[in-house]
Image (cartoon, rainbow, N blue to C red):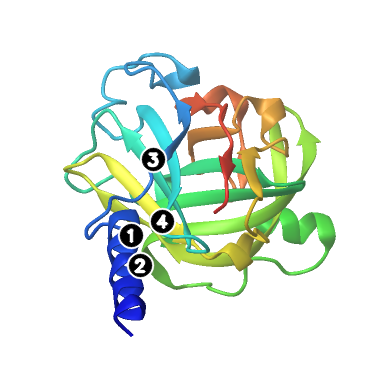
Amino acid sequence: MKKLVGACVVALLVGAMALPAGAKAAKPTVAFEDAAGDAGVQNSSTPGAAEAGFDLIKGEISQDKKGGDVKFVVSHASMPPTSQPAEAFRFIWGFAVDTEQYEFTVKSIDVGEPDVITSGITQDPHGEERVGQVYQGVARLETCGSVAAPSLTLATCDAQEYFTATFDPAAGTVTWSVPLASIGAKKGSLITGGGGTRTATGCQICWVPHYLERSLTPHTIVDAAAQLKSYKVK
């Protein structure tokens, strides 16, 4: 009996050493980095662009625990007290989970409206699910295709899900989290840089003006980056 009790005590001590109280979570993976001071018209330095919250610094991916939600954090050189100019601009992050391509479209304020581009091309209503509604801080998960047009690329996107995006002006960050099931991820899946519709326009990751919902004019990119490091899902 004494031997059994002794063995249990040793097991508990070993477990306590292996999992110390208050142990820190693994450091986030820095998926992309971008030099400060390059935000502006056509991805060049323009006065006021950084102060408006468009100067990308880095993007991180992490999980708080194994099998937990995937967290995306995008850091900026600075951000105004009211965050970025709402519906007028949006942040895009194109990425892949294993072989499946996705995009996030992130806004500090989102006004629900029909997707006239995709609806017109497919002759099927798109973007009708939130028409007329206004949301504070939204990260919209999408799957997209594209159609070439003069001077711009028209993205034909299907919204998959909507997530809350938290804009923190003091920290200069935008943060949102996504369940593994939403992006078809599992333990061991790789989250890599997207090779979808935006790459031809230099916007795998970028801030751009709102121009005909879900479209992109290459010459109006405010700041752009590329994901060079993959994240392995725990």
Neighbor class of circle 2 (other Cα within 10 Å; few <14, some 14-19, many 20+) is: few
- Judge whether 207 appears above or below 186 on screen: above
Q: Which amino acid does label 3 sit on?
A: Val
Along the line of sight, the residue nearer the viewer: 66 or 117? 66
Which residue is identified by label 2? 11
Q: Distance between the residues labelled 3 and 1?
A: 38 Å
Q: SS of the residue at dot 4?
A: strand
Q: How far apart are marks 4 and 3 (CA)?
A: 9 Å
Q: In this view, does 153 lie to the left or right of 29?
A: right
Callout 2 touching callout 3 (CB < 8 Å): no
Residue in the image at 39% along x and 31% along y: 58
Neighbor class of circle 3 (other Cα within 10 Å; few <14, some 14-19, many 20+) is: many
In the picture as drawn, the residue positioned furthest to the bottom comes out as 1
Quadrant of the frame with the N terminus = bottom left
Residue 74 circle label: 3
Neighbor class of circle 4 (other Cα within 10 Å; few <14, some 14-19, many 20+) is: some
Q: Which of marks 2 and 3 is nearer the N terminus?
A: 2
Give the number of the mark in front: 2 or 3.
2
Which residue is identified by label 1? 14
Residue in the image at 70% along x and 54% along y: 143
Give the number of the mark in front: 3 or 1.
1
Q: Where is residue 142 in the image (x, y as percent from the top left)?
A: 64, 56
Residue 34 circle label: none
Q: Which of marks 4 and 1 is nearer the N terminus?
A: 1
Q: How far apart are marks 4 and 1 (CA)?
A: 36 Å
Q: SS of the residue at dot 1?
A: helix
Q: Earlier in the sequence, mark 4 or mark 3?
A: 3
Residue 176 circle label: 4
Residue in the image at 44% along x and 73% along y: 133
Q: In this view, does 104 lie to the left or right of 118?
A: left
In the picture as drawn, the residue positioned furthest to the right comes out as 122
Q: Where is residue 225 in the image (x, y as percent from the top left)?
A: 51, 26
